[in-house]
C-alpha cells in the first residue's frame, strides 16, 4: 500500500555524473587553481600596501586628565574618504553574559516593565533591589558601558577638519532597529543611560565586537585630504576608564581599498593556500611522469597484496 510510485525520481533512477579523478584531470586543476590563488594573494597584498594608516595610543598620554591633545603628521597625502576609528584592547565584548544583557524591544522604541527587563541582568533598574518600574533607558551591560570619549579634529591653524559623524552605522541599524520611544527620554532622569537611542556613536557601540581588541568607526573625512608633513591635532575628551581591565585606548586614522583597511591576513592565506596547491600539483606531476600508474590496475587492490 505504501510502495512509492514507479518513477525515476522516487525509485532513484535519475541520471547522474560520477567523475573519475584521473591524474590528467587533477594535476592541471591543482596547478591552475594554485596559480590563480597566488595571483589573487599578491594583488591583495599590493592593494593592502596602498592603505595609509596612522595609529596612536592615547590612554597613557591622557592619564588623569579630562581633556588632552594628540598631534599627528601624515607621512603621505591621505585622500578622502579618511576614516577615524577608536580602538580598545583587552575588552571582551563577546562574553556571553555581556552579549545577552540587552533589551531589543527597548532599543526599538518600546517601553518595557521591570519584569520585561530581566534580560538586562544585572543592569535593570534604578534602585534595583526595590523592584520598581524605574527601568534604565536603555538597560543592560552593553548600553551601561557605552564608550563616551569625544574627539575634535583640527589642523595646524586650528581650523575644524569638518569630519562627518553621520552614516557611520549600518543603514538597517539606524533606520529599522534603533528607534527612540514616542515619549522622549529625559536626559536628567536617574534612569537615563543614553537619552538618544538613534545616536550613531551609541549604535556603533551596540554592534558587538568578536575579538578582545577591536576598532569602531567614529567619523569620516568625506572631502579633501590630510596633507603630507602637516600637523593635525585631536582634542580628546578623556572620559572612558580602561585601567580596571588593563586595557588600552588608541586612535586610528586610515584610508581603505575595495578589500577594506590595512589587514594582510587574507592575502597571506591566498598565497599559502595557492603555494600548497601548486606544490602538490607539481609533486603529482613528477610522480606521474617518473612512475605512472595505469588507470584501473587491479594489482593495487589490498586483497592482491
Image: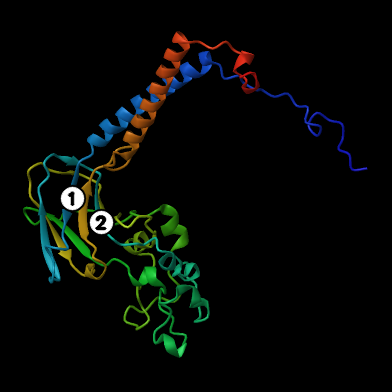
The C terminus lies in quadrant: top right
Q: Secondary structure at mark 1?
A: strand
Look at mark 1 in the image and give the residue it sits on: 55
Q: CA distance from mark 1 to mark 2?
A: 9 Å
How would you rate the neighbour count of disc 1 (Cα within 10 Å): few for under 14, some for 14-19, many for 20 or more?
some
40 left or right of 262? Answer: right
Measured as percent of width and height from the top left, residue 79 is found at 20, 40
Q: How many marks?
A: 2
**Residue 172 visible to the viewer:** yes
100 left or right of 158? Answer: right
Discs 1, 2 touching: Cβ within 8 Å:
yes
Q: Residue furthest bottom?
A: 130
Q: Is residue 74 above or below residue 38?
A: below
The N terminus lies in quadrant: top right
Q: Is residue 233 above or below residue 97?
A: above
Q: Point out which mark residue 261 bears.
A: none
Q: Residue at x 32, y 57 (%)?
A: 212
Measured as percent of width and height from the top left, residue 146 is found at 32, 68
Q: Secondary structure at mark 2?
A: strand
Q: Residue furthest front?
A: 305
Q: Is residue 50 above or below residue 164?
A: above
- The quadrant holding residue 267 is top left
In-front residue for pair 107/241: 241
Look at mark 2 in the image and give the residue it sits on: 87
Q: Residue at x 15, y 60 (%)?
A: 58
42 left or right of 100? Answer: left
Measured as percent of width and height from the top left, residue 223 is found at 22, 45
Q: Residue at x 38, y 64 (%)?
A: 198
In-front residue for pair 142/217: 142
239 left or right of 175? Answer: left
Q: Residue at x 52, y 77 (%)?
A: 116
**Residue 111 visible to the viewer:** no
Amino acid at each position: 500500500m505504501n510502495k512509492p510510485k514507479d518513477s525515476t525520481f522516487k525509485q532513484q533512477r535519475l541520471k547522474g555524473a560520477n567523475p573519475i579523478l584521473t591524474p590528467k584531470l587533477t594535476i592541471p586543476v591543482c596547478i591552475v587553481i594554485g596559480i590563480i590563488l597566488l595571483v589573487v594573494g599578491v594583488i591583495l597584498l599590493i592593494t593592502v600596501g596602498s592603505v595609509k594608516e596612522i595609529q596612536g595610543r592615547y590612554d597613557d598620554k591622557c592619564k588623569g586628565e579630562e581633556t588632552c591633545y594628540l598631534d599627528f603628521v601624515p607621512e603621505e597625502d591621505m585622500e578622502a574618504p579618511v576614516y577615524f576609528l577608536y580602538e580598545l584592547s583587552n575588552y571582551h565584548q563577546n562574553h556571553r553574559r555581556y552579549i545577552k544583557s540587552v533589551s531589543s524591544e527597548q532599543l526599538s522604541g518600546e517601553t518595557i516593565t521591570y519584569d520585561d527587563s530581566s534580560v538586562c541582568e544585572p543592569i535593570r533598574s534604578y534602585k534595583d533591589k526595590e523592584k520598581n518600574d524605574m527601568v534604565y533607558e536603555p538597560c543592560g551591560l552593553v548600553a551601561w558601558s557605552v564608550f563616551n570619549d569625544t574627539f575634535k579634529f583640527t589642523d595646524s591653524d586650528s581650523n575644524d577638519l569638518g569630519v562627518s559623524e553621520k552614516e557611520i552605522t549600518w543603514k538597517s541599524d539606524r533606520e529599522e532597529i534603533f528607534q527612540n520611544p514616542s515619549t522622549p527620554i529625559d536626559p536628567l532622569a536617574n534612569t537615563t543611560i543614553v537619552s538618544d537611542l538613534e545616536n550613531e556613536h551609541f549604535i556603533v557601540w551596540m554592534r558587538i565586537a568578536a575579538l578582545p581588541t577591536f576598532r569602531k568607526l567614529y567619523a569620516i573625512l568625506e572631502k579633501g585630504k590630510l596633507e603630507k608633513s602637516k600637523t593635525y591635532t585631536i582634542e580628546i575628551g578623556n572620559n572612558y576608564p580602561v585601567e580596571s581591565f588593563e586595557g588600552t585606548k588608541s586612535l586610528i586614522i586610515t584610508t581603505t581599498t575595495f578589500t577594506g583597511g590595512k589587514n594582510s591576513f587574507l592575502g597571506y592565506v591566498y598565497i599559502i593556500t595557492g603555494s600548497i596547491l601548486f606544490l602538490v600539483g607539481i609533486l603529482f606531476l613528477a610522480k606521474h611522469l617518473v612512475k605512472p600508474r595505469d588507470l584501473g590496475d587491479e594489482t593495487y587492490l589490498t586483497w592482491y597484496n
